[in-house]
Structure formats: structure tokens, C-alpha cells
Image (cartoon, rainbow, N blue to C red):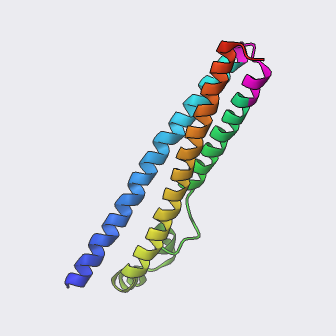
């Protein structure tokens, strides 16, 4: 019984990690969207030099790429073999059997999903930081009047 209890604890932990990652992803996606909108609004009204345009353009590309990774991370996986898609294809008896015998497989599947989501989130954070640095560089180049 303790092994089953332990599997349930691990299962709950993995599901909680997915929820935390999804929350972080949603917050970062909102932040990236706000930065993109703000940068576009400011850049549209400023006379940018060529170096500032290049740095700002690259920064925007990195932020759009980060947004794409974040959206990919939150995209539902309907082909997965665990969770809702699986349960929707089973009868009530099959669900009971699957839950009692396949908890370890569900933990493995959810863990792979969590790692994939976390990897996308980490890459998106790195791209957001790099894009932000390039946008700051574009602002400094514009303010400094570099040609």
C-alpha cells in the first residue's frame, strides 16, 4: 500500500509542476506581449538610426520567437496517452482498470510533458532576456544618436 501511496504522491507532484510551469508560461506570455506592443508603439513614432533599427528589429524577432515557444508550450497535446484524451476513449470500467494498473506509466508520460514544457519556458526566458537587451541597445543607440 505504501508503494501505491508513494506513486500517488509522485503523480500529484508532477501534476503540480505542470501547473506551476503553465502559470509561469502564461505570465511570461503576457509580459512578452506587453513588451512587443510597447516597443512597437514607441519605435513607430521615433526616427531610428540604422544601428538602432537593426538592434530593435532583432530584439523584436527574438521576442516573437519567445512568444511562439510559449504558445507551443501551452498547446494542448491531444495525442498524448495520459489524461483527458485517454479518459475520453475509455469506458468506466476501463478507466478504473487503467488508473489502478497504469499510474507509473501516467507519471512517466506526465513527467515527459513537464520537461518539454519547462524546456520551452526556459528557452523563451532566454530569448526574452536577449530580446530585451537588444531593445535596450536600440533605445541607447537612438538616444545617443549613433549613425
Question: Would residue 36 be found to the left or right of residue 30 on screen?
Answer: right
- Is residue 47 found inside the magenta-colored segment of the image? yes
Q: Residue at x 61, y 44 (%)?
A: 66
Q: Position of residue 135 (x, y in %)?
A: 63, 28
Q: Where is residue 98 in the image (x, y as percent from the top left)?
A: 40, 83
User: Residue 29, relative to residue 13: is it above or below?
Assistant: above
Q: Where does the C terminus fall, quadrant-wise?
A: top right
Considering depth in this image, is 87 or 52 the residue closer to the camera?
52
Q: Where does the N terminus fall, quadrant-wise?
A: bottom left
Q: Which residue is drawn at 55% across and 46% down?
A: 126
Q: Residue at x 60, y 39 (%)?
A: 130
Dominant secondary structure of the magenta stretch?
helix
Q: How many marks?
A: 0
Q: Position of residue 51 (x, y in %)?
A: 76, 25
- Is residue 127 found inside the magenta-colored segment of the image? no
User: Residue 128, relative to residue 51: is it above or below?
Assistant: below
Q: Where is residue 27 in the image (x, y as percent from the top left)?
A: 46, 40
Question: Would residue 89 be found to the left or right of residue 47 on screen?
Answer: left
Q: Residue 142: name its quadrant.
A: top right
Q: Residue 107: name its quadrant.
A: bottom left
User: Residue 123, relative to residue 130: is it above or below?
Assistant: below
Residue bounds of the magenta highlight: 44-54
Amino acid at each position: 500500500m505504501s508503494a501505491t501511496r508513494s506513486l500517488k504522491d509522485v503523480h500529484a507532484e508532477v501534476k503540480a509542476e505542470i501547473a506551476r510551469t503553465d502559470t509561469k508560461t502564461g505570465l511570461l506570455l503576457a509580459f512578452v506581449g506587453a513588451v512587443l506592443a510597447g516597443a512597437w508603439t514607441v519605435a513607430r513614432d521615433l526616427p531610428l538610426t540604422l544601428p538602432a533599427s537593426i538592434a530593435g528589429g532583432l530584439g523584436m524577432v527574438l521576442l516573437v520567437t519567445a512568444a511562439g515557444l510559449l504558445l507551443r508550450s501551452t498547446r494542448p497535446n491531444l495525442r498524448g496517452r495520459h489524461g483527458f484524451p485517454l479518459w475520453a476513449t475509455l469506458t468506466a470500467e476501463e478507466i478504473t482498470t487503467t488508473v489502478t494498473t497504469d499510474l507509473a506509466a501516467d507519471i512517466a508520460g506526465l513527467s515527459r510533458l513537464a520537461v518539454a514544457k519547462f524546456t520551452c519556458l526556459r528557452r523563451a526566458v532566454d530569448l526574452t532576456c536577449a530580446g530585451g537587451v537588444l531593445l535596450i541597445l536600440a533605445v541607447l543607440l537612438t538616444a545617443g544618436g549613433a549613425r
